[in-house]
Amino acid sequence: MKKRIITLILPLALVFVSVGCTVNSVSEGDYYQKGLNIVECMDKMAECDDYIALLSASPDMNNIIKEIGKNDYSVPKAVYKVTVTPEEIDRIFLGATGEETNLPDEILSEARTRIVLSFPSRINAMEGAYAVASTSILTKSESFISQSTNEYSLYFYIYDGGYSACVTFVPGENNIVSATGYFIINDDLSNTASQDEFSQWLFDITRIIDIEVEDVSASTETE
């Protein structure tokens, strides 16, 4: 698998992220496949008229959700894994003088999580409030056990048609990892044709922090 270290940007504003349903913890497994399973579940949510009617009375939001549901998300054209260590996330909290913030550990941990979770909402915000609200209805969360890493990671599942997906993996206590999926509405992301183009796309919309980008298309990794 090809790896590359690039400079990225994280949003300074922490965006509130709605999460979908939570399922019971499961055994260790392939992050790639877990993420893809979450995306396919989100697709079923977008295709369910009764679910849409239950959670949204907005015609504009409903139209966006139905458009999302028209796509086939079973086979992404590319998947990129973005890895961020806790130390790299902490750099956001360094002031102009280089002094570290005095956030208590428990608050710092929550801030790290919110920074990672804010990625998809920040991207969708570029398309407007309806994009953020519509995709928030389709989020889905799952927890599972993994002893493989304490790093935060985001898997970007790229599809044609302007609608892609991102699944965040956030480590917690007792080796429990929380995975949350989001649809991403962004034509430029859909049009990326290589890892270099994806890295440039991500660089253009983010704030400065060094993270690792890896092409995991058709991954068979086991965590």
Image (spheres, rainbow, N blue to C red):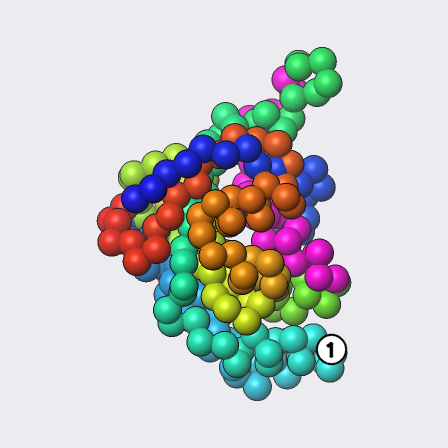
Residue occupying the point 73% across, 78% down: 60
Q: Is residue 211 left or right of residue 2?
A: right
Q: Is residue 145 magenta?
A: no
Q: Is residue 125 magenta?
A: yes
Q: Is residue 197 left or right of residue 12?
A: left
Disc 1: which residue: 60
**80 or 148, which is in the foreground?**
80
What element does badge 1 sit on? helix
Where is residue 124 shown, x and y percent of the image? 65, 58
The image quarter containing residue 212 is: top left
Where is residue 37 shown, x and y percent of the image? 37, 65
At label 1, the amino acid type is Asp
Where is residue 207 shown, x and y percent of the image? 64, 36
Residue most extreme to the bottom: 49
Tag 1: Cα neighbours inside 10 Å, few (<14), some, or many (≥20)? few
Res 173 visible: no
Question: Which range is magenta?
Answer: 100-128
Main SS, magenta residues: helix
